[in-house]
Image (cartoon, rainbow, N blue to C red):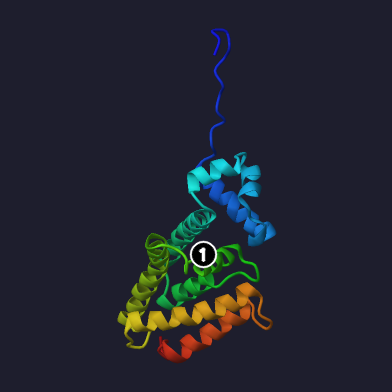
Amino acid sequence: MSPTSSPRRRTPAPPREEVLAAAMDMIAERGLEKLTMAGLGREVGMSSGHLLYYFRSKDELLLQALEWSEGRLGAERGRLLARAGSARERLAAYVDLYVPDGHGDPHWTLWLEVWNRSREAGDDARERQAAIEGAWHRDLVALIAEGVSRGEFRVVDADRFATRLRALLDGFSIHVAVGLRGTDQERVTAHVREFLADALFTPDA
């Protein structure tokens, strides 16, 4: 470099959260199949090579995007569960937050893709996915245990009931996310409310 030439300035990489937010926006607007490293790079002003440098692979990018989205949902879930009100009301809020908005819900679209890819993922990726599931489960167990202690819920094993309830929510949610005919958020939450009324809620609470 000659003494008179100015040093080349590197374009700073956008913050990690900006990249992950852009990925989620692309999934919401165009679908997961249209999310490519090259396309995402154009959205955030980075080359696909730079994205691969930071994320190593598309699988890792998708997992980090899911973790970022889950972090936001976790914060919202924490606010809902900490607010004043009955355990029943907060359980209804938990269910509403859990079930996807509709066909193509970006969070659930990403969740399904990451779990589909988990067959080839390493132990680290599977542990991170399990951590996501564990956070939802622990919050639900604590809420059910609280409802039992307050007499709003029948006496049940909170962990076992939470496991079964989440299996029900997962099954219904997948139907909504993939657009199975005859399923939508309103119908699913109605089914779940009916199940809870029969299996968990005390008649006089």
Q: Name the outermost residue toward the top.
A: 3
For residue 111, side relative to residue 202 (left or right): right
User: Quadrant where the C terminus lies?
Assistant: bottom left
The residue at the point 46 percent across, 80 percent down is 167
Residue 84 appears anywhere in the view: no
Front residue of 69 and 143: 69
On the image, the x and y values in percent for residue 138 come to 35, 70
**Which residue is tagged 1?**
114
Where residue 40 appears, x then y in whole percent? 62, 48
Q: Write down the quadrant of residue 136 in the picture.
A: bottom left
Is the N terminus in the top left, top right, bottom left or bottom right quadrant?
Answer: top right
The residue that appears at 66% across and 80% down in the rendered structure is 180
Tag 1 secondary structure = helix
x 44%, y 61%: residue = 74
Residue 32 in sight here:
yes
Q: Residue at x 67, y 57 (%)?
A: 34
